[in-house]
Image: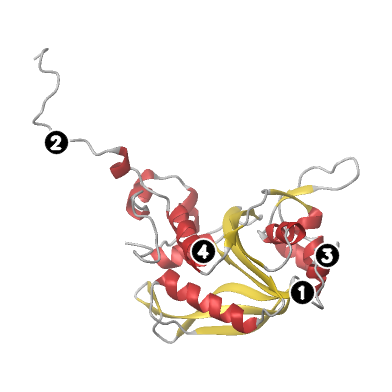
Amino acid sequence: LAAETIDVTLPLRETPAETGRIHPLSQVWDELTTIFADMGFAVAEGPDIETDDYNFTKLNFPEGHPAREMHDTFFFNPKADGSRMLLRTHTSPVQVRTMLSQKPPIRVICPGRTYRIDSDATHTPQFHQVEGLVIDKGSHLGHLKWILHEFCKAFFEVDHINMRFRPSFFPFTEPSLEVDIQCRRDKGEIRFGEGEDWMEILGCGMVHPNVLRACGIDPDVYQGFAWGMGIDRIAMLKYGIADLRQLFENDIRWLNHYGFKPLDIPTIAGGLST
């Protein structure tokens, strides 16, 4: 027995590539990046700790603006000059940084972590967003609608999906729109591309001229559009995850159920999910 320390009759252990799992948020991040990259979008990133100027003021949230109350967030202690850094409430500061550092035309998506003081079944203090930005001389809402329609078809993997655009308000876009997509709710399941129900999934609009001016772009020459959606929310919708908080509980049993094998890499040609 001492000589035969290896029992060749035992089954092989699974390799780390077989036992490990990709988190659903990482999978969805790769899926949406693949879709938008196929449309010619670059990926832009920025810091999680932002200035008040980039997070609010340059996005047409002047100090004292009531819309700031929707973004109650985590502020750091004031500096000697009275300014305060904060954990960004959206990835829109990345749009500001992109417009300040690049000349139009601009076509980027901005995925990343964001922070707000919320905590329940559909909100967590830290969550993920992806925003898109297009700045050009001839960009208009028709281009925005087409991009969002193609994205929803590809992401939810359906041949066609009806969309509804409703007027709304955001300080950084004018006009602003909320986007609903067609779905069917049945026995606790949601099916997209069929049925007579509607579900709101994102907000969008034409970039406000004040934002363009604040970033050094002439609104009489260039115009653009932007949109934003929650990565966690669309991951829940696509993969039937009931509670947002489960995404961040680090339960290995949950990850074994909802996770993806590392070799299941999303591609437009091979399919986003398996």
- Which one is earlier in the sequence, the residue at label 2 or at label 3? 2
Question: Which residue in the structure is indicated by mark 2?
Answer: 11
- Which one is earlier in the sequence, the residue at label 4 or at label 2? 2
**Label number found at residue 214:** 3
Q: Amino acid at mark 4?
A: Ala
Q: Amino acid at mark 3?
A: Ala
Residues marked 2 and 3 touching at CB (< 8 Å):
no
Q: From what the image shows, is residue 13 above or below residue 37?
A: above
Name the image quarter holding the N terminus: top left
What is the distance, in whole Å, between disc 4 and disc 2 at their CAs? 42 Å
What is the distance, in whole Å, between disc 4 and disc 3 at their CAs? 28 Å
Q: Nearer the viewer, residue 59 or 241?
A: 59
Q: Could you say where residue 226 lies in the image, as x and y percent from the top left?
A: 65, 71
Q: From what the image shows, is residue 185 above or below residue 242?
A: below
- Which one is earlier in the sequence, the residue at label 3 or at label 1? 1
Mark toward the viewer: 1 or 2:
1
Q: Could you say where residue 149 lies in the image, as x and y percent from the top left?
A: 51, 78
Q: Image point 34% across, 50% down: which residue?
A: 263
**Label number found at residue 208:** 1
Mark toward the viewer: 1 or 4:
4
What is the distance, in whole Å, between disc 3 and disc 1 at their CAs? 10 Å
User: Which corner quadrant of the image does residue 202 belong to?
Assistant: bottom right
Q: Nearer the viewer, residue 139 or 122?
A: 139
Q: Image point 14% across, 18% down: which residue?
A: 5
Local secondary structure at mark 3: helix
- The answer to whether any part of residue 152 appears in the image is yes
**Label number found at residue 37:** 4
Residues marked 1 and 4 touching at CB (< 8 Å):
no
Name the image quarter holding the C terminus: bottom left
Q: Could you say where residue 230 lies in the image, as x and y percent from the top left?
A: 56, 63
Q: Amino acid at mark 1?
A: His
